[in-house]
Image: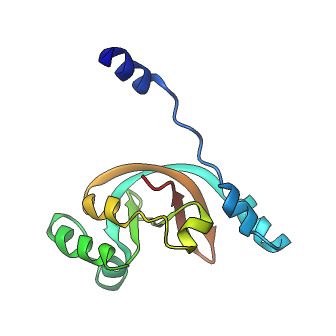
Amino acid sequence: MLAFALFVAMTQTPATPAWSSTTLEAAATPEQKQVLAEAKPLTITGEVVDVSCYTQLGKRGPAHKECGAKCVLAGAPAGIVTADDTLYILMPEPHHPRRDGKASIAKEYAAKMGDTVTVSGMASEHGGIHTLFVAPN
């Protein structure tokens, strides 16, 4: 039975990322709805960093794992730096639970600090900033 469950889990296609109902509800103006419409599902691979130390001091990699994890657990956003050096800030998606402090990705990404990961979510480039909105685990 366990082998069958593993087979099913390995052969299922992951769901395509999409905006949650609370995010769609939060878009109250035509301009905000346009920002959501411009986003796209995206899967990226790269190194987990804490955005504060990375953008301020260029810190990353195994030597920065402990410091980066502390920064993310203390409230700094986590990010992914891809092979072409694009920084994606990671944010939990859905909107209302994030706003209300009920959705966090801090522990998950603090534990992966400095690791290379592959992540899927809704990608938004607004105001020159790359953000990937991901489902909290």
Query: Which one is nearer the viewer's eye here, 11 or 8?
Result: 8
For residue 39, side relative to residue 92 (left or right): right
Residue at position x 43%, y 21% in the image: 8
- Quadrant the N terminus occupies: top left
Up the image or down, 44 lies above or below 23; here it is above
Up the image or down, 119 lies above or below 39; here it is above
x and y percentages locating residue 103 in the rendered image: 48, 64
Query: Which one is nearer the viewer's eye here, 48 or 15?
Result: 15
Q: Quadrant of residue 77?
A: bottom left
Up the image or down, 94 lies above or below 45; here it is below
Residue at position x 49%, y 26% in the image: 12
x and y percentages locating residue 117 in the rendered image: 34, 50
x and y percentages locating residue 91 in the rendered image: 50, 66
For residue 85, side relative to residue 94 (left or right): left
Query: Which one is nearer the viewer's eye here, 16 or 108?
Result: 108
Query: Which one is nearer the viewer's eye here, 10 or 83?
Result: 10
Q: Give the residue at the far right of this rendering.
A: 30
Q: Give the residue at the far bottom of this rendering.
A: 56
For residue 44, side relative to residue 115 (left or right): right
Q: Quadrant of residue 34?
A: bottom right
Residue at position x 65%, y 55% in the image: 20
Q: Give the residue at the far left of this rendering.
A: 63
Q: How is the image coloured?
A: rainbow
Residue at position x 85%, y 70% in the image: 30
